[in-house]
Amino acid sequence: MRNKSHIEWTESTWNPVTGCSKVSAGCKHCYAARMAARLKAMGNERYANGFAVTLHPDLVDAPRTWKAPRVVFVNSMSDLFHQKVPFEFIQSVFKTMAECPQHTFQVLTKRSERLFDLAPRLNWSPNVWMGVSVEDQRVIERVNQLRQVPAAVRFLSCEPLIGPLEDIPLDGIDWVIVGGESGPGARPMKIEWVRSIFRQCRKANSAFFFKQWGGVQKHRTGRELRGKTYDEMPVPQSPDARKLELLSA
């Protein structure tokens, strides 16, 4: 199963885990929770448990059946590093990613502490990009924990951006995605927050991707900043370079 994605920074989604639980302010209006409720109401068997964390072992090997290379967002409907996902299951997902080098896998978590703890025991193949969600200054420590992970690409998802982010430790961060919250109850994003992150990315030479302004009807607000769209993508680093970088830090 490969699902084509409408998320601007990826091509496909792969959900060997579904369901999650709220862990910080960015989760308040979780799009995945709303979607899971709709899918359950429609009778989708994958969401019989609603948004409770659910493993789907039969989907772990799905990328092996995809012939054409794809950029894949892993667990768009969950968090691979959720405490209810067993380490052995995480290992099996990483094994599949390592054995499917034709694809690029983007993993995103809010559980940076568990990521930091487990990272030394995982196989960081060159096609795995690792990111953390950073919605405001209260969770800035997630960036420092990510910087200790030897992924070929380390990235930040500042979405929904619900507060300013100043002095982001961008050394070793390859890519920053910024976006406003969308959907019912969307909290506003201030232009000065976005401009500050843009300037910090330029200073640190981190690729900058502006996803959306957001709002209840995001199609009305668009995704232009300074009169243009920013769809910059990162340059992956070699695993050896990442390991050397961590040793010298």
Image: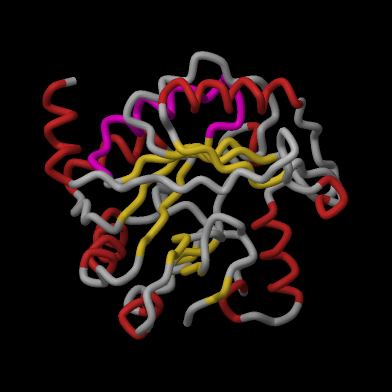
Q: Using the rendered view, name the quadrant where residue 94 is placed.
A: bottom left
Image position, residue 2 (x, y; %): 49, 78
- Residue at 26%, 72% (x, y): give it: 100
Image position, residue 165 (x, y; %): 59, 20
Front one among 138 and 173: 173
- Is residue 13 toward the left or the right of residue 223 in the image? left
Q: Using the rendered view, name the quadrant where residue 155 is placed.
A: top left
- Is residue 235 toward the left or the right of residue 75 in the image? left
Magenta highlight range: 134-151
Residue 121 vertical placement versus 85 (above, below) = above
Location of the C terminus by quadrant is top left
Magenta-drawn stretch contains 123: no
Residue 75 vertical placement versus 62 (above, below) = above
- Residue at 49%, 27% (x, y): give it: 201
Image position, residue 81 (x, y; %): 39, 48
Image position, residue 149 (x, y; %): 27, 37
- Is residue 14 toward the left or the right of residue 62 in the image? right
Magenta-drawn stretch contains 147: yes
- Residue at 22%, 51% (x, y): give it: 124
Hey, which residue is sitting farthest top in the picture? 167
Q: Using the rendered view, name the quadrant where residue 97 is placed.
A: bottom left
- Is residue 186 toward the left or the right of residue 130 in the image? right
